[in-house]
Amino acid sequence: MLTLRPYQLEAKHAVYDHLRTRDDNPCVVIPTAGGKTPVMASVCQDAVTLWNGRVIILAHVKELLEQTADKLNAVCPEVRYGVYSAGLKRRDTDRPVTIAGIQSVYQRACEFDPFDLVVIDEAHMIPPDGDGMYRQFLAEARIVNPNLRIIGFTATPFRLKTGSICTPDGFLNHVCYEVGVRELIVQGYLCPLVTKAGQAKADTSGLHVRAGEFVAGEVEALMDDAQLVRAACAEVVEATRERNACLIFASGVKHGEHIVSVLKAKHDIDCGFVTGDTPTEERDATLARFKAGRLKYLCNVNVLTTGFDAPHIDCVALLRPTLSPGLYYQMVGRGFRLHPSKANCLVLDFGGNVLRHGPVDQVRVKERPLGVGEAPAKECPECRALIAAGYAVCPECGYEFPPPDRAKHAARASDAGILSGQVTVETLPVRDVMYSVHTKRGAGDDCPEVAAGGLQDRLAPLEIGVGLPGARRLRPAEGGRLVEEAVEGTGAGHGGRGRRDRLCGRVGCDHVDHGAVGERRGVRPHHRPRTRPDPRVAGSRRGV
């Protein structure tokens, strides 16, 4: 029998507290691979064995239906359940728990006996309005049982266009429990993610947007560039030499076929390929080979974002850009599952998604009321006609709009942290070093002022206390030592303050440096030292 993890028990208790104290419907947020299905199975067990209720679990892909059936067997083998799915060739209706594909039952709610509880996996699939399949089924199920309660489970409680899936007048009203990605990684329940810079990256600045997402045809045309595909495939192969399984997300069917052919022709690699049009038997066979480890690379187009469970995936390659934070999260989430063969999962992003959406554990969509915002249109400067923003030529007068400015893409793909709190380290060549020495007024002779450090080949002599009694010069010498010498010619200077102009400490510079005195008098030195202390220098010396 499967035992729930602590946070899964907390999620279940939060659901029960909500159902007891509120009249609306709760939603549970658990990250991808965090184990939503065991919680759903445990809720079904309690509903049937403790309250003699009837439950239907809804999902939109058959893989989720199969996972739910497996977890019901593991959590509560004593509970009788049925499956209603055309894809699985089963139509059970007389069991206390029914696992159903929404495509198969959305017009048949009135044909079932009344349900007391509807559990929805991947609840973000419920549309905010209109006559979608979920909305139709739930509306009719409430006619059969007006006291019906609904529980949603999801990893992404938001939609691209409308924000949160929980609204006062929606089918789901309140997030009763949420656990985060970082929390589960720290607790050891999710696999850490890492990112690595690449050399090939597409420029998406000229892509148009339709319904909140990049236009699909334009995305595929951009990403299917021959040079980009070759470069990206080479990077993927090089980065995954020591890894077990790589899942690739392509921008379209032709783009995916191009990736598969380049991997075979240039690198002699067999890469599987599945799309929404792949025959069921061929798709199942390909996925079985990948899960069994007989196929290292698997490319897909919009089919393995939800419900696909392959724990050994230790590299996810995003060869498609998206404006959808939910899709971005779901793609990256394929690498969250734990497996003994991997220490982390590498995310290779060729579409700028990490920079676009931020760390995967902080992905959110801003709340935005329906119907608010500018329409995707533009005005023709010749005839003043308002036309769709995608037109290159005005349909009214024939005016040709100038092409959008396309900045050249970066030479390197982003290595921004895939998780919040990750530090990106960038190494830059050092061309020059300058130090400015400061002695605190009134400080004793034993006050630290400067330290030797092996920079004698880069530093000009440093003069301390110029113009004051006891002024001295520290000259770099061999072995990293500093030799102290007296400074001659001290005397009165500007403003009656004893001082002497000296050369700037920057190597190769002949400018006169007036130091701290000049700054106090409002004279900005031509090389102003930064205020951040240099860790290599002790005391109060500051460096650049």
Image (cartoon, rainbow, N blue to C red):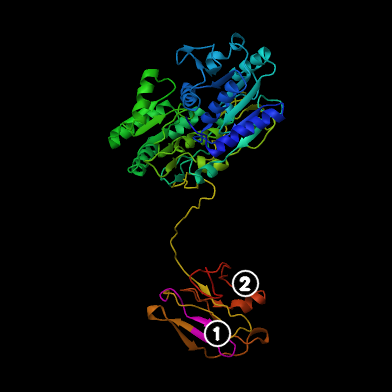
Instruction: Name the residue carrying label 1.
Output: 446
The mark total stands at 2
Where residue 402 sits in the image (x, y, percent)?
56, 35
* Left or right, residue 80 beside residue 145: left
Please identify, in this view, whether the residue under mark 1 or under mark 2 is nearer the observer. Answer: 1
* Vertical comparison of 200 with 498: above or below: above
- Magenta stretch: residue 446 in it? no
User: Which residue does the image show at 50% across and 16% down from the upper left?
Assistant: 83
Could you tell me what secondary structure mostly forms the magenta stretch?
loop
The disc, 1 or 2, on the residue closer to the chain's N-terminal end is 1
* Vertical comparison of 426 with 313: above or below: below
Q: Nearer the viewer, residue 34 or 530?
A: 34
Where residue 73 sits in the image (x, y, percent)?
47, 24
CA distance for labels 1 and 2 = 30 Å
Where residue 30 sits in the image (x, y, percent)?
56, 35
Q: Are marks 1 and 2 in contact (CB under 8 Å)?
A: no
Q: Which residues are magenta?
A: 456-473
Instruction: Name the residue carrying label 2.
Output: 524
User: Which residue does the image show at 44% across and 58% down from the upper left?
Assistant: 427
- Magenta stretch: residue 467 in it? yes
* Left or right, residue 190 beside residue 10: left
User: Which residue does the image show at 56% across and 16% down from the upper left?
Assistant: 96
- Please, what is the three-letter code of the amino acid marked with disc 1? Asp
Q: Which mark is residue 421?
A: none
**For mark 1, does the 10 Å Cα neighbourhood hold few (<14), some (14 to 19), or many (20 or more) residues?**
few
